[in-house]
Amino acid sequence: MATTLLSLYNCKNNAELYKKVKENSPEIKNLKKFINFLAENQKNENIKLESRKFTNDYIRNKKNIEKMIFYLNGNNEILEEVPTKEIDAKEIIKYAYDIDAQHVILAEKNKYENSIIPVVLEKKAEKMKEEMERFEIELLDVVLINEKEENISLIFKDNPIDSIEQNGNSFFLKEQKNENIKIEKEKHLKLKGTEKFLKYYSEKEMKRLNVLTEWDKIEENLKIELSELNKEKFIFIEINKNGEIIKKENLFEGTINFSTVYLREFGKRLLNVNKGNSIMIAHNHPSGTLKASTADILITRKIEKMCKFAEIPLLEHYIISKHGIFSFVKEKIIDNQYPELKDQIKKQNQKGNIRWK
């Protein structure tokens, strides 16, 4: 049984496998489906907890869960799922503010026999609900997860989720239809070398793409490389005077907190950009959320000021996740400098899909 991506497709290196993909070789059709899924099938749609039954089924589907915090928007759509060791109301409220969540559901494994729940747990849940409501954050439920039986709710039975019609099965039906691609996705993600090949593929595909006319391909390839990673990466892209991508680099990875060290690394790379060129940056959210956090916004504005000082236009900052792509320019968090670049490239043929007008 193959344990690496290259051995699965009988290739010696990434260059050989990339060539097979470009030639649409029949033996790599499953890899092609996987790549297309990463590029095209990531939608900016959050899962909606549409009923108590659906919520119970969805939470029970989470494997090996000990404790989990579900942050939801006002429509009960999941913004982020955060595993945790401790339930701290203050930290939950702070993070809910950070990602603009309005509702929260807490879940943990039921460790009590015969579904006998101590009264103290119910009182603790109700107290936490009251505390969070003071900060305009609604704790919809605290759920004790049973693997075989129904989950147990510690919050009042008139939970807002109950009032919604129980049509949540649509998600699971959709999941069943996509079961084949899900199997292929999981299989490829488990193989050694997949991450390196997706990086190689993305770099080859993005070379010389034009940011004015081929922005859709740029976004697709960033999703291919970053959307399914379980660690954070920060990508630095240099663009020449003609609007073409000439360099794409992984500047740092791990837990990106944009500390002074990271800003110094960014500044060092920024000052090596050729005069007249511009840049684009991107990082991923392994948690799946597409909301820019307060920290994301603050650091991006610092980076924008650094770019203005260095006279290097910052064209875009993207956040990538398994749910899609977030644009700091589109959301008007940073200045739109595409028109200036467009004016600078007077000789460029303006055929194609120009994003910013």
Image (tube, rainbow, N blue to C red):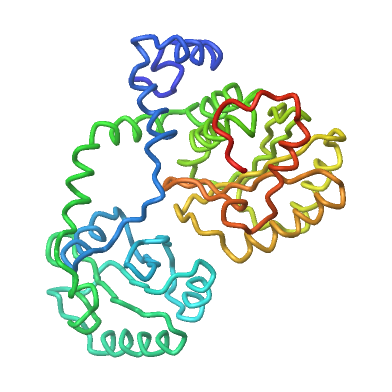
- Which of the two residues, 327 or 284, is positioned nearer the viewer here? 327
Residue 162: % across, % down:
18, 74
**How many numbered discs, if any?**
0
Q: Where, by quadrant of the figure, is residue 43 drawn?
A: top left
Quadrant including the C terminus = top right
Quadrant including the N terminus = top left
Task: Determine if residue 209 is in view.
Answer: yes
Residue drawn at x 22%, y 84% as measured from the top left: 156
Residue 294: % across, % down:
61, 66
Answer above or below: position of 8 versus 53. Answer: above
Q: Where, by quadrant of the figure, is residue 60 drawn?
A: bottom left
Residue drawn at x 45%, y 15% as measured from the top left: 21
Residue drawn at x 16%, y 73% as measured from the top left: 113
Q: Is residue 292 left or right of residue 251?
A: left
Residue 127: % across, % down:
35, 90
- Which of the two residues, 57 or 172, is positioned nearer the viewer here? 172
